[in-house]
Each structure stands twice: as C-alpha cells, then as structure tokens.
Amino acid sequence: MKCVDVFNEKYLRDPAGVAFCPYRICPIGAHSDHQLGMITGLAIDKGIHIAYGPKRSGIIELRSLQFDKRAQWHVNSVPEQKENDWADYLRGATAALRRKYPLTVGLCGVIEGTLPIGGLSSSAAVIIAFLSALCKVNHLKLTAQELIETALWAENQYVGVACGKLDQSCEIYSKKDHLLFLDTRDDSYELIPTNPAMKPYKIAIFFSGIERTLAGSKFNMRVDECRSAAYALKAFSGMEYGKFNETYLREVPYETYLEHKHRLPENWRRRAEHWYTEFNRVQLGAEAWRKGDIETFGRLSFESGHSSIYNYETGSPELKTLYEIMTQTDGIYGGRFSGAGFKGCCMALIDPAFEESIREKVTKEYLKVFPELTGKYSVHICESADGVDF
C-alpha cells in the first residue's frame, strides 16, 4: 500500500498498524435515514487505509494522499470551529471521542483512499478508520453502536452535515455476501444472506469525474424540506409536534400524508413522496433479495434512482447522464446515484458475464456527452465485503 510506503519515508519507521474502513453502497433507501427510514446497504472491497503510529505527546499529525495540506492538532485541544479543509472530519472525530473518553496518546498517519472521492461515504469511512486507529493507540474498545454514534456526531455537530446513520452503519455492520437491511429508527437490522438461487452479481462504480462534498451541496436543504413537510403534515392533521429539528417523516403515517399532501408546497410534497415510496421500495427490495430475485431488486434500485431525480431533485447533469445510460445497458440489473446525488458516482449491480461490454458501452456513451472528462471518469468493479474490523 502506498500509505505504508509514504509513512516509512516520512517517519523512517514502519507503522504500528494500518486501519481500514470499507466504502459502502446503498442500492435502495436513498435519502431515508435522516428521516428515520429503512435502508439497504453493502460494504465493498475498496475503502480508506490509514498507516499510523502512536505519538506520546498527544499530537495528531495526518497526511492524505488525496490532498496536499498536512493537518495537525492535539487530542485535548481540538479547534472549536471547523477549518473548512479535508481534516475537519477527523478533528470532529477527535472531539467526539473526547466527549466520552480521556485521550492521552496522539498519532501520526498517512491516509489513502482506493477510489475517487464522492458518493461512497468516503467521509464516514475516513472517520471510522481514524477512530479505529485513535482507539487502538489509546487502548479503547468501542461497541459498534458507540462507533456509529461517535462518527455521526463528528459529521452532524462538528462538520455540520445533517446526515443520518446509513453510511456508518453500512461500513460497520455489513458482511460479505449479505445485504444489510437496517431500520434507522431503532437501529434494528438484519443481514440477509445471498440466496443460493440468486444469479451472480458484481458491483460497478461509475465515477463521473466530478468530486463533491455534502457540506457544500444542497444536502442540508433537502433535509430541511423533509422536516418541513413532516412538521406541516402534523399541523394539518392535528398531531402534536415539538422542535423542528426533532421532527421526522417516519412519525407521520402514510395515510396522513395522502390526506394532506395537496396542502404542501410542491417541493415539500415531492420530498415526502420520495421518502414514502422509498420506504416501501426498501421493504420490497429486502424481500426480493431474500428470495434471490436480483432482477426485481435491481428494478427497485432503478426506481429509487428515478425518484431521486424527479421527486428528491438531486443529480448533476453528469450523474443523470450516467443513470440514463445504465438503464439502457444490457447486463445491469439496476442502480442509482451512490450517495446523495450531488456529483460523485453511480453504482450498479451487474451480471459479471457482461462486465466488459458494460464497461465499454457506459464509457463510450458517457464520454460522448462529456469528452472533457476523459482521464477523470473511471469505472471500478467491486465485490461485497465485511464491515470494518475494529
């Protein structure tokens, strides 16, 4: 791994360890977790590696192979405000861990991502890999739930992204050749094994060539629109309601939505329409996976992508183009934007027998529309994987 080589070069010694966290995909369950919905997920065999060693001084010193600036802070003196660079997620993770546990040992580390940034929850993956390393040098052992909540606090409270726990849960709970079926309201989950009768599949990642960050996108606005719809529906129906930031569409029955949706502003109605229909798609998708029906599962993933474009109104021109090409390509069971849909990449479940023809067709058709992205666009074929070992 390059991160190990760079660590050796910079610190003239071998790293004490290499922390790894996989990236994840969410085939069905888009834009659901922040409203306490259900999701499906798979970890993939690509992710974030951090070669690290302890620093008894308490200093944290990090380099990233994706970014130029080196970052440094003390475990007990994290800047109160984010500094608007790549290391904010890790400052936030340090602050989050310090809220529950005393920290005395810092670390030096080199971070390497094995896929381009955007749409695979790289922010959650780097946080979890970093927390794994920081816990080990401080001899701490977190439960899975503690690790999820700590990583989520870093994104929500420090960085300011109003995401739910989909990313962290997928990257921690996932198991190779199983589909994660998670209810984010109570954190109950099931790992559904791949049915022996299911047709073979691989996971294709089509990177658009355009990177993105949730903190700089319309992600938080969409979350507020969902909350606004829930708040209004509660008011229209006479339900009790409290704080705006503690209001979720999951609390509003579907029947209430149907009765009062005509009273919502159009953009709020569209966000709610996506959420309720996606909630249903997730349950149908879990059942299809359980039966080994990957064609139905793939179709539902395509429907999720369509609703993300037309009801949730996400998607750059590049991602919309990739999605449309995918729907017209033989051998692709289904797919959608990976992540929030603001630039980044698309994921697809594919028949391995069509791997080369899929790669060739999608690449040719996409670069015909966006020739300027030649050399930036890329295709990556992945397998399902276990979640992080912490």
Image: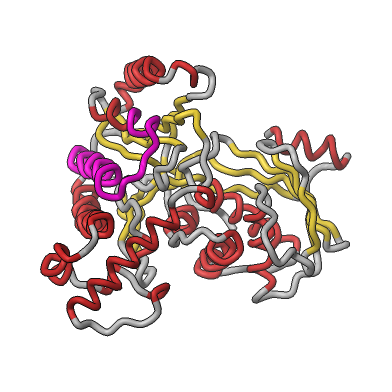
Q: Residue at x 39, y 68 (%)?
A: 187
Q: Position of residue 343 (x, y in %)?
A: 45, 38
The answer to whether residue 197 is visible is no
Quadrant of image for the N terminus: top right
The stretch drawn in magenta includes residue 109: no
Question: Is 384 located above or below residue 361 in the figure?
Answer: below
The answer to whether residue 378 is visible is yes
Position of 15 with respect to 272 (left or right) is right
Quadrant of image for the C terminus: bottom right
The stretch drawn in magenta includes residue 309: yes
Q: Residue at x 15, y 68 (%)?
A: 260
Q: Residue at x 81, y 56 (%)?
A: 54
Position of 359 with respect to 136 (left or right) is left
Q: Position of residue 154 (x, y in %)?
A: 59, 63
Q: Position of residue 296 (x, y in %)?
A: 18, 42
Q: Residue at x 53, y 52 (%)?
A: 215
